[in-house]
Image (cartoon, rainbow, N blue to C red):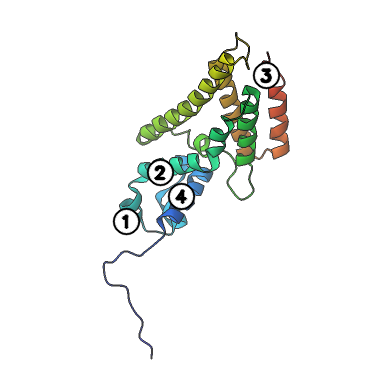
């Protein structure tokens, strides 16, 4: 009878931390922060609660790592959009990126940041603050790009970069909510096209 090698007692089971984090992204993306229980997270990540705490910290710390991964991955279209040569191109690329990212068949629909924004418990205050800072950072980058567009003459001199940045981000979040509710990519793109028809031109 063959003898089986056994893992030494007390030695943690090996796992791919990067893969586990990617799975956590999908859980938070689908369920939001409060809807993602530790049981659901650890099952999806393929690790024990002890291993999760040892590797990623508590749920809040894990979420911060997930938000960073989401920003560098699915949400990276924002940084690329800011490199478009015109303000209209920037707005169109941001909204097209939102539509594309929030309706991919292989991913949860909607936006991870928007899905997790409805944190209501006192325990979620720091997560809510982190998400506010995340949204503010994105909006600030857009506002600065539009300020440059005004200085370069690409936008009218009387254009309000801060208002335009709020307009684009608010529409983007609205598209994400619609996507999470089942709106199709074509329907969302139709909204984008309608919203940009009134874009200020010089």
In the figure, 62 relative to 177: above or below?
Answer: below
Between the residue at mark 1 and the residue at mark 3, the CA separation in whole angstroms equals: 52 Å
Which mark is first along the chain, 3 or 1? 1
Residue found 56% across the figure and 29% down from its top: 82
In the figure, 44 relative to 186: above or below?
Answer: below
Between the residue at mark 3 and the residue at mark 4, the CA separation in whole angstroms equals: 38 Å
| The disc label shown at residue 65, or none | 2
Between the residue at mark 2 and the residue at mark 4, the CA separation in whole angstroms equals: 9 Å
**Residue position for label 3:** 199
Q: How crowded is mark 1: few (under 14 residues within 10 Å), some or many (20 or more)?
A: few
Q: How crowded is mark 2: few (under 14 residues within 10 Å), some or many (20 or more)?
A: some
**Residue position for label 4:** 24
Determine which quarter of the picture holds residue 47.
bottom left
Q: Nearer the viewer, mark 3 or mark 4?
A: 3
| The disc label shown at residue 97, or none | none
Between the residue at mark 1 and the residue at mark 4, the CA separation in whole angstroms equals: 15 Å
Q: Nearer the viewer, residue 88 or 118?
A: 88
- Determine whether label 1 and label 3 are within 8 Å by CB: no
- Determine whether label 2 and label 4 are within 8 Å by CB: yes
Asked if residue 21 can be seen in this view, the reply is yes
Residue found 60% across the figure and 31% down from its top: 94
Asked if residue 34 can be seen in this view, the reply is no
Q: Which of marks 1 and 2 is in front?
A: 2
- Determine whether label 3 and label 2 are within 8 Å by CB: no
Q: Residue 189 location, x and y as percent?
A: 70, 33
Which mark is first along the chain, 4 or 1? 4
| The disc label shown at residue 50, or none | 1
């Amino acid at each position: 009878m063959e003898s089986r090698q056994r893992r030494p007692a007390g030695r943690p089971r090996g796992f791919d931390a990067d893969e586990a984090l990617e799975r956590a992204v999908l859980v938070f993306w689908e369920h939001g922060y409060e809807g993602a229980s530790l049981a659901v997270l650890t099952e999806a990540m393929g690790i024990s609660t002890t291993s999760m705490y040892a590797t990623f910290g508590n749920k809040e710390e894990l979420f911060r790592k997930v938000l960073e991964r989401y920003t560098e991955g699915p949400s990276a279209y924002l940084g690329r959009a800011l490199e478009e040569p015109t303000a209209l191109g920037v707005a169109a690329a941001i909204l097209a990126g939102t539509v594309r990212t929030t309706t991919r068949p292989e991913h949860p629909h909607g936006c991870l940041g928007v899905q997790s924004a409805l944190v209501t418990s006192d325990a979620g205050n720091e997560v809510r603050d982190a998400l506010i800072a995340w949204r503010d950072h994105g909006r600030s980058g857009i506002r600065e790009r539009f300020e440059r567009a005004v200085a370069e003459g690409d936008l009218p001199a009387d254009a309000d970069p801060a208002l335009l940045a709020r307009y684009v981000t608010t529409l983007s979040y609205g598209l994400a909510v619609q996507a999470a509710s089942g709106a199709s990519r074509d329907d969302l793109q139709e909204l984008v096209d309608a919203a940009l028809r009134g874009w200020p031109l010089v």
